[in-house]
Amino acid sequence: MIYLDLNQHMDIETETELHKGMFIVYEIFNFEVCNKETEIQRKRWWFVLLFNNSVIVFSQLQGQFHLNGMHKTGDVILGGLFQIHFFSVDPDLSFTSEPEQPTCYGFDVIGLRQAQTMAFAIDEINRNSNLLPNVTLGYSLYDNCIQLGIGFRAALSLASGQEEQVTLEENCVGTPPVLGIVGDSSSRRSIAISTVLDLYRVPLVSYFATCSCLSDRQKFPSFFRTIPSDAFQVNAMIQILKHFGWTWAGLLIIDDDYGVHAARSFHSDLGPAGGGCLAYTEILSWGDNPAELRRIVDVMRKSTAQVVIVFAHQNHMIQLMEEVVRQNVTGLQWIASEAWTSAAVLQTPHLMPYLGGTLGISIRRGEIPGLRDFLLQTRPNLHHNNTDENSVVNQFWEHTFQCRFAPPPGWVEAGGELCTGQEVIENVENELVDVSNLRSEYNVYKAVYALAYALDDMLQCEPGRGPFSNNTCAHLQRLEPWQLVYYLDKVNFTTSFGDQVSFDESGDAIPIYDIMNWVWLPNGRTKVQRVGEVKRSAFKGEELTLDEDKIFWNFESKQPPQSVCSETCPPGTRMARKKGEPECCFNCVPCSEGKISNTTDSMECTSCPEDFWSSPQRDHCVPKKTEFLSYHEPLGICLTSISLLGTFICVVVLGIFIHHHSTPIVRANNSELSFLLLVSLKLCFLCSLLFIGQPRLWTCQLRHAAFGISFVLCVSCILVKTMVVLAVFRASKPGGESSLKWFGAVQQRGTVLVLTSVQAAICTVWLVSASPMPHKNTQYHNDKIVYECAVGSTVGFAVLLGYIGLLAVLSCLLAFLARNLPDSFNEAKLITFSMLIFCAVWVAFVPSYISSPGKYADAVEVFAILASSFGLLVALFGPKCYIILLRPERNTKKAIMSRGTK
C-alpha cells in the first residue's frame, strides 16, 4: 500500500523533493530487460523510500496506469497534458487489488478544445512540406483531471512509456516515448512535473503555467512556456494601477505558488514601479472555510481601498463572491488575474452588480485558420469503445447531447436518450467549436510549433558542425530529449497571426497580455471586451495601451474610482509619512520658506537657487526682490532733492560771491579760498548722488573716493583759512611780520593741494589693493537681495574717514584758539561753529552706519554728507550772504574794520 496522498496540499519545496524521490522509485519499477524478442519484461518490486526521516512503503504496482487520453502514432511523439475533467476519484493502488482507471467527472469542454488544438497543430505540421519533411509527428495526450497525482502519473507515463510492449531495435536503441511535452495548465503541477522531467532534460512547454518561480533556469533548465510569467502579469497590473492613479489597493491570493509568488512580486514592485502600496493582503485557503471568508470580506468592506486585485482560480472566486453578495459589499473595482478573467461561471446576473466593470489580464487572443473545421470533424468511434481517445470523445458527446452510449439500467425508461454518433455538433450551442476567443488554445498552438521548429532545426544540422560533443548532430533514430532543449532555447518564428515566438534566457516567451473589461449590458447580459493591451518590447520596455472610452465603469459617475489612502499632495507641499502606516498614507506638509515643490505628491521640497525665493503658494521660485537706495522710492527722492538743493545753493552763493567779488566782505580772508571752498561743497553735495541707485562697479569705486577727496578739499580750505587768520593776527603784533611770508596765496594753494593729494593717494592705494565692488547681500533678509557696495578693505575705508576726521579736528582746534580774536581780522567763530557741526555729524555717523542694514546704511551716509555739507555752507557763508544781500551798508572796509572797536 502507498502511504501517501499526492493530491494533498503541501509546501512546494517538500512536494518537489518528494517527486524527485518518486521518480527514482518509478524508474526502478520500470527496470527494463532487453532481449531478442525485444519485449520489456516488467518486474514487480517492493520499495522503501526514506524521506525526511519518514518511511514511505511502495508496493509492487500492478501493471500499468489507466489514464484518459488521445493518441496518434508517428515517427516522433509529442506528449500533452490537459484538463479535460474538473474532478476525480483516485483509484485503489494497493497491492491487494487490481489497478483501476481514475474516475474523472465534470467534463471541461475547454480542456478538450485545447487538446484538439494540439492535435490540429500536429496534423497541420504533418501536411506542411516545409516543416519537418519526411517526419511524421504523433501525439499522446492525457487528461490530468485537475489533480496533481493524476497529472504527475501521466507525465511519468509519457516520459518512460506505458505500453505493454515497446518495439525497439535489436541494439535497444530508438526514439524515446515522447520527445517533448506540452503542458501542464497549472503552475503547481508544472513545478512538480518539470522538477522530475528535468532529471532527463525532457522539455516541458507549458501553455498556462504562469508562476514566476518557473523562470529559475537553475531549478527548471528544460522548462519553457508560451504564456507570460506572473512577474509580467503583476507588472501589467501595476501599469493599470499607475495609469488610473490607484495607489491604494487590496490583494487577495490563492494559497499556492500561483498566489504566493504574485504576492511577493506585488510587495516588491508596487512601490518602486507604481508608487502604490497594499492596504491588505489576504489568502484564500483551499477548501470550504466560511468563517475565514467572512473575515476576509469584512476586511474588504471596512478598508478604504476601492480596488481589489485577486490572484485566484474561478472556484475560489465563486466561494468568495457568495460571501461578498451575502454582505452586500458593492462599490469595488475588481482587477482579475488571467486565471478567472474569462470565467463565464462568474458572469451571471446575480454577480454582475458586484463584478461589473472588472478589469482583467487575459492571455493574448489569436486566430488559428482551419481549427473550427477540424473541430467539427470530431466524432465518436462506435467500434472501439475501449480506446482512451474514444472514451474522451464519447464523454464529450454524452456531455454535449445529454445522451448515453452505454446507458445504465433504467436510463431509457426514465426518458434518457441513446447516443447514435450521428448527432450534428453545429446544431447545438457548445464551446468546442467556438473559436472566436482563442487564448489558451493559441498558446497550445504556439507551443506545438515551438517544439516542431526546434526539431526541424535539430534535424537540419550539418554533420561535423553540430553543437554537441565533437561537433556531432542529433539523429532521428537516436534522438534524446535534452538535445531538443538546446534548439528550443534558440527557436524563433512568426505565427500565421503575426506574433513572434521566441524564448529568453529564462525560457519565457515574449510577454503580451490583453486587457479585458466586464461590460454589464442594459438587457442584463454580460460581455467581456478587449479594451487594451500591455506588452514588453526590447526598446520601449513595458507599454500599456488602453481605450478608455470603451471601458465600462460600474459606478454611478461612470468614471474611474479614486482609490488612495491619502489625497494627492498638491504643489507647494510635501508628503510626510504617517508613523506606523504604509507609505501611501501620509500628510501634506507645506514647504518652508525658500523651498518649493512643483509636482504633486512630492517627497521633498527643493531649495530655490540663491537669487530666487519661493512664491506664496510654494509651487515655484520667483526672483528675489532687490533692495537698494533707489531714485524711485520716497527716501531716495528726498535725499536726491536735498542733494540737488544743496548743489543749487552752492551755485547761487558762488554766483553771489563772484558778482560781489570786489566787496570787502568777499575779499576779506582770501576770496580764492572761499571760491574753492564753495566748489568743494558743491562736489560734496553731488557725490551723495553716487550712493543712490543700484550699485555698479564704477559707482562703488567712485562714491567713496569722490566723497573722501571732496571733503578733504573742503576741510583743507577751512584749515588753511584758519591758519591764515592766526598768522595775520600774529603779524599785527610787534616782531610778527615774518609769519605772513609762509601764508601767501601760493603757500595757501600749495597747502590745500598737498593735503588733498594725501587723500587721493589713500584712495588710489585702496582702489588698487582692495577695490569696493557690488555685492548681493542675502544675510539681512531671506526673501530679498540687498544690493550694496562692499568696501573691499575696511582698513582703507577707516583710513579715509580717519584722515578727514584728523583735518576736521585740527581745524576745529585752531578755530577754537582763534575764537576771541577781533572780528576785523578773522572768521574764527564761524569756522569753530561749522566744525563743531561737522564733527558732531560724523561722530554720530559711525555707530549709525554700522547698525543700519542694507540700503539704510547708504541713506545714513548720504544723510551725514548732506548734513555736514549744509552745516559748513550755512555756518560759513550764511552770515556773509546776509550782509551782502540784506545789509549792504555793512559791506564796507570801514564797517568791517570798525566792528572790532564798537
Image (spheres, rainbow, N blue to C red):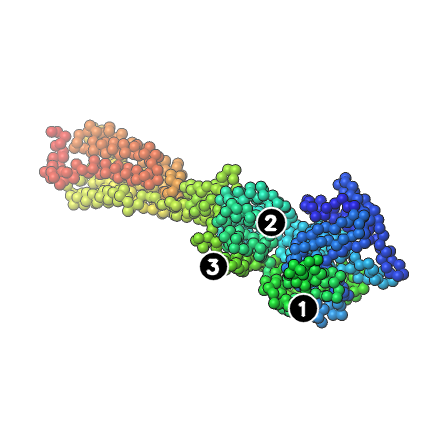
Task: Say which amino acid is labelled 1.
Answer: Gln
Estimate the x, y position of residue 33 in percent, counting from the top left.
87, 56
Residue 236 shows up from this direction: no
| Residues at marks 3 and 2 touching, judged by CB atoms closer than 8 Å | no
Q: Residues within 10 Å of mark 2 (few under 14, many from 20)?
A: some
Residue 830, placed above or below residue 555: above
Residue nearest the observer in this picture, 181 or 580: 181
In the picture, the disc for residue 316 is 2
Element at label 1: loop
Q: Residues within 10 Å of mark 3 (few under 14, many from 20)?
A: few
Q: Which residue is mark 1?
A: 422
Distance of mark 1 from mark 2, alpha carbons?
A: 39 Å
Query: Which tag is nearer the camera, tag 1 or tag 2?
Result: 1
Task: Compare marks 3 and 2 and give the one earlier in the sequence.
Answer: 2
Task: Say which amino acid is labelled 3.
Answer: Pro
Task: Compare marks 3 and 1 and give the one earlier in the sequence.
Answer: 1
In the picture, the disc for residue 647 is none
Element at label 2: helix
Q: Which residue is mark 3?
A: 522
Estimate the x, y position of residue 825 in percent, counting from the top left.
18, 33
Residue at (50% x, 42% y) in the render: 302
Estimate the x, y position of residue 899 in percent, counting from the top left.
13, 32
Task: Say which amino acid is labelled 2.
Answer: His
Judge from the rendering whether residue 655 lies leftward or rightward of residue 378; answer left or right.
left
Q: Residues within 10 Å of mark 1 (few under 14, many from 20)?
A: few
Residue 401, placed above or below residue 309: below
Farthest right residue in view: 36
Distance of mark 3 from mark 2, alpha carbons?
A: 28 Å
Residue at (75% x, 54% y) in the render: 101
Quadrant location of the C terminus in the rendered image: top left
